């Protein structure tokens, strides 16, 4: 054995002896390059709430905000509980820069990976593979480069699972109370944490066969939820959770009415399969080592049928990207990832059918519950909604690979490496798009914020954050006031439309900046809709990515300046 071989072998032995350090270092290595990522999508909401907490710790949402084009209380615009913002508020003592807040968000990501490794020790022989298969998928890696609540919620979720599963082992009952505390924190990070209650209660009934004292820790998250709802009712005059439910119900009803009725549910299910397959791409990458040839052909056939039916249904109803002219490149990617989504559900079903133990039932209910929750209770399907499936998918893959094997197949290791490379590319594309928005906002404000008139803008997400930071103001639909010298900036790839009559406006400047060249997380021209299916059916999309455009409008010299 030469010197290089001995060095490689010593590294492998060190990794084997120190799995926690290995996973921590790999997580940091994957995420540190994204520390300077600009705030994007809903990041500004969490940052502004953290700044509010910094000044007034007892009223996290006691402020007004123009997020949808009109001013409203923060507690109606923000549909999540405030734990993540409290966490960012602590980090804010060291400054509000992007690197500082992203650095603080490394801790939840590391906790998620280590929690998956710990949970996998109870369920499979290869916990390291399961932990890495959780980290190196596009859904997790991209989410970990934001300052939103999803990764924190999932880290707490996973550790609640760890303590709950280990709490039923002999002389470990105190961990059940730790699990109850973690469940309480999970629902304070995101309301999805409520799904843990029935999931862990079901696991307790499966292992213990009847209710008992083990049920008492479940009262901790229930009591916490009731206390939080009472507090928000006292502070804001309405339960925050009920307000979120009303928002979701209204959005679903509007979407269903616009999309033609019951067919929308089928389309949302197919959308969830596509997003699952792409967001947790490791399931498709490992497909040759998970399934025999006949089973793989059945999965491919099921995916083909579902996509064909969805495209046919799109001819009957209007539902986002299931309508319009055929786009073979987009539809091919949709089919590819839908097969992966079908494979994930097949993994959960096969595992529980073949093993029928408490672990298999837990994973089946975990995957099935999250997957069903998305189309039933959410008004949109995106990678963030399905993110809680990530550890369960990785565990199912690790358990399936154990079948008739004594070591992880070399091909499966190569598949994990390929999935990691894909995930890093997708995360870089998301980083590039956020950077383009920040750069454009900075250029617009530098040129026009100090002009003779006021600089307004239309749109939110990161564009709003950086335009406001540069001195511009969000356009208020309730007070549409533009003077002859005022300017209006609009980002083409954003959610808000101009509500001023086009005949009153003239284009003063068209700013065009390049995006990441071959893959996009949010771009309707190629069908990428990582954060919203309204932009496309794919969690990310490959293709020729056009440059982004930003427009500067002013009032026409002789136009009627009265609001339309």
Image (spheres, rainbow, N blue to C red):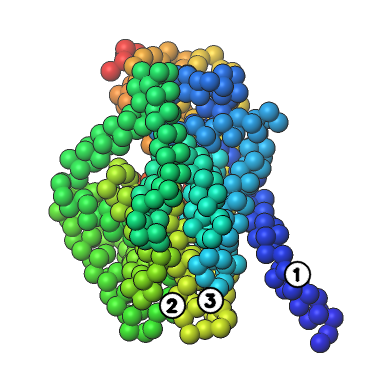
Residue 553 percent coordinates (x, y): 43, 26
Sequence-first disc among 2 and 1: 1
The count of marks equals 3
- What residue is drawn where x is 78% and y is 75%? 10
User: Which label lies toward us, 3 or 1?
Assistant: 1
- What residue is drawn where x is 56% and y is 57%? 171
Residue of label 3: 412
- What residue is drawn where x is 52% and y is 27%? 49
Q: Nearer the viewer, residue 124 or 499?
A: 124
| Residue 147 seen by the camera | yes
Q: Secondary structure at mark 1?
A: helix
Sequence-first disc among 3 and 1: 1
CA–CA distance in space, label 2 to label 3? 9 Å
Residue of label 2: 290
- What residue is drawn where x is 59% and y is 46%? 108
> Where is residue 443, by image quadrant?
top right
Q: Nearer the viewer, residue 118 or 530?
A: 118
Sequence-first disc among 2 and 3: 2
Marks 2 & 3, CB-CB < 8 Å contact: no
Above or below residue 400? Residue 108 is above
């Amino acid at each position: 054995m030469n010197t290089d071989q001995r060095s490689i072998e010593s590294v492998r032995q060190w990794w084997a002896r120190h799995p926690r350090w290995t996973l921590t270092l790999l997580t940091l290595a994957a995420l540190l390059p994204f520390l300077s990522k600009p705030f994007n999508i809903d990041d500004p909401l969490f940052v502004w709430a953290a700044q509010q907490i910094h000044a007034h710790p007892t009223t996290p949402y006691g402020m007004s905000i123009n997020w949808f084009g009109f001013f409203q209380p923060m507690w109606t615009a923000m549909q999540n509980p405030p734990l993540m913002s409290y966490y960012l508020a602590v980090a804010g003592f060291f400054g509000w820069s992007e690197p500082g807040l992203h650095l603080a968000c490394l801790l939840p990501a590391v906790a998620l990976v280590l929690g998956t490794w710990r949970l996998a020790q109870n369920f499979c022989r290869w916990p390291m593979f399961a932990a890495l298969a959780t980290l190196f998928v596009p859904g997790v890696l991209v989410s970990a480069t934001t300052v939103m609540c999803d990764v924190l919620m999932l880290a707490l979720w996973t550790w609640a699972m760890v303590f709950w599963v280990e709490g039923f082992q002999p002389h470990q009952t105190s961990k059940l109370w730790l699990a109850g505390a973690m469940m309480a924190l999970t629902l304070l990070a995101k309301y999805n944490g409520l799904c843990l209650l029935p999931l862990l209660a079901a696991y307790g009934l499966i292992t213990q066969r009847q209710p008992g004292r083990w049920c008492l820790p479940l009262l901790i998250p229930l009591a916490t939820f009731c206390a939080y709802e009472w507090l928000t009712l006292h502070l804001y005059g309405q339960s925050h959770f009920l307000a979120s439910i009303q928002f979701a119900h209204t959005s679903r009803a509007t979407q269903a009415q616009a999309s033609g009725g019951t067919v929308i549910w089928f389309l949302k299910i197919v959308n969830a399969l596509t997003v699952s397959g792409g967001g947790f791409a490791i399931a498709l990458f490992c497909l040759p080592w998970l399934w025999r040839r006949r089973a793989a052909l059945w999965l491919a056939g099921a995916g083909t049928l579902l996509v064909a039916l969805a495209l046919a249904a799109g001819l009957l109803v209007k539902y986002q990207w299931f309508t319009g002219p055929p786009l073979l490149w987009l539809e091919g990617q949709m089919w590819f990832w839908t097969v992966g989504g079908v494979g994930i559900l097949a993994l959960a079903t096969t595992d529980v059918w073949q093993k029928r133990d408490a672990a298999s039932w837990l994973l089946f209910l975990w995957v099935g519950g999250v997957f069903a929750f998305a189309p039933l209770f959410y008004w949109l399907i995106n990678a963030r909604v399905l993110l809680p499936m990530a550890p369960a998918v990785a565990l199912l893959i690790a358990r399936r690979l154990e079948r008739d094997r004594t070591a992880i197949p070399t091909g499966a290791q190569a598949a994990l490496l390929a999935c990691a490379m894909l995930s890093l590319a997708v995360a870089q594309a998301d980083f590039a798009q956020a950077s383009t928005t920040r750069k454009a906002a900075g250029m617009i404000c530098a040129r026009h914020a100090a002009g003779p008139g006021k600089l307004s803008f239309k749109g939110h997400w990161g564009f709003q954050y950086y335009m406001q930071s540069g001195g511009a103001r969000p356009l208020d639909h309730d007070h549409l006031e533009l003077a002859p010298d005022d300017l209006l900036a609009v980002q083409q790839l954003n959610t808000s439309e101009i509500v001023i009559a086009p005949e009153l406006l003239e284009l003063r400047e068209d700013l065009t900046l390049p995006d990441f060249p071959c893959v996009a997380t949010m771009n309707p021209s190629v069908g990428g809709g990582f954060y919203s299916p309204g932009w496309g059916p794919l969690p990310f999309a490959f293709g020729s990515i056009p440059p982004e455009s930003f427009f500067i409008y002013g009032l026409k010299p002789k136009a009627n300046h009265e609001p339309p």
